[in-house]
Amino acid sequence: MRQPIMAGNWKMNKTEHEAADFVKELKPRVSGISNCTILICPPFCNLSKVHDEIVDSNIQLGAQNLFWEDKGAFTGEISAPMLKSVGCTYVIVGHSERRQYFGETDETVNKKIKAALAHHLNAIVCVGETLEQREKEQTFKVIEKQVKEGLKGLESSDFKNIVIAYEPIWAIGTGKTATPAQAEEIHAFIRKLLPKEVAAEVRILYGGSVKPENVKELMGQPDIDGGLVGGAALKADSFEQLIKY
Ligand code: PEP
């Protein structure tokens, strides 16, 4: 039985004060929910503050990125032990914005996943095709490469800490959502790419303009186990509606 996850990716939004206010508002709205993993992924500078606010709640903390070395002369980077030390249990790896604007590749994604796992962080591994790739009917090929190369070298036992997020790039922040059937087709395909012994257990999230109006239908698909949500996770009331889909 796969427990659903609703993960809010705040991207580069919210000051420390705004982050604390959000959590104060969300906490009572979702208290008592135990059948869905509730996760928020604020910017690095707000992790500690958010951690203080979520203590003793059912909300978990994730980061949006990490570097693969533990420490050293890597100006501007943040390591897995640092994320653990401020209370993170999850980290997003290979978000399309990181691939698009910051040069991340399947190879760097693979190193980051291994660093996260080595420090007992759950890695949310993002994959997804561009509109051009979809129109050229390359979606399956692109996804297969991202999944296989991103997860290269992992042992079966590692997969209990792996979550995959299918995020078609053309649907992120655009208001366009993949239809539930389009999303399900790719989720089922991704599940088939996973090692047989773990495939049924790995949670696969959908991301791309998830909102209160479409969440129920998306979550009704057999291989969709949650959402990685940007815009609709920035307000406590809409995030609450997603969590209570
Ligand atoms: C995301 O941040 O990964 C995302 C899917 O954003 P949005 O929900 O705004 O499309």
Image (cartoon, rainbow, N blue to C red):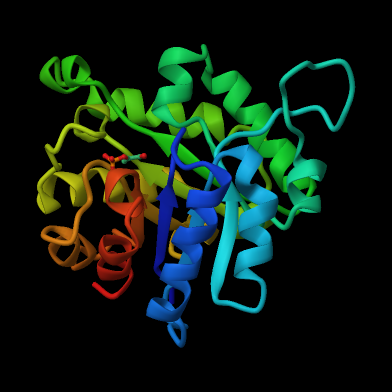
Q: At 32% across and 62% down in the image, what residue appears?
A: 239
Q: Going by the picture, which residue comes out furthest to the bottom? A: 32
Q: At 14% across and 44% down in the image, what residue appears?
A: 182
109 left or right of 27 in image: right
69 left or right of 213 in image: right
Residue 109 percent across, percent down from the top left: 58, 27
Q: Is residue 187 above or below residue 201?
A: above
Residue 245 percent across, percent down from the top left: 24, 72
Q: Based on the displayed image, in which of its 4 quarters is residue 227 positioned? A: bottom left
Q: At 32% across and 69% down in the image, what residue appears?
A: 240
* Front in this rendered view, residue 8 or 215: 8
Q: Quadrant of ligand 1?
A: top left
What is the quadrant of the N terminus in the image?
Answer: bottom left
* Front in this rendered view, residue 146 or 209: 209
* Front in this rendered view, residue 27 or 8: 27
* Front in this rendered view, residue 226 or 48: 48
Q: Going by the picture, which residue comes out furthest to the front? A: 17
Q: Is residue 101 above or below residue 46?
A: above
Residue 125 percent across, percent down from the top left: 50, 40
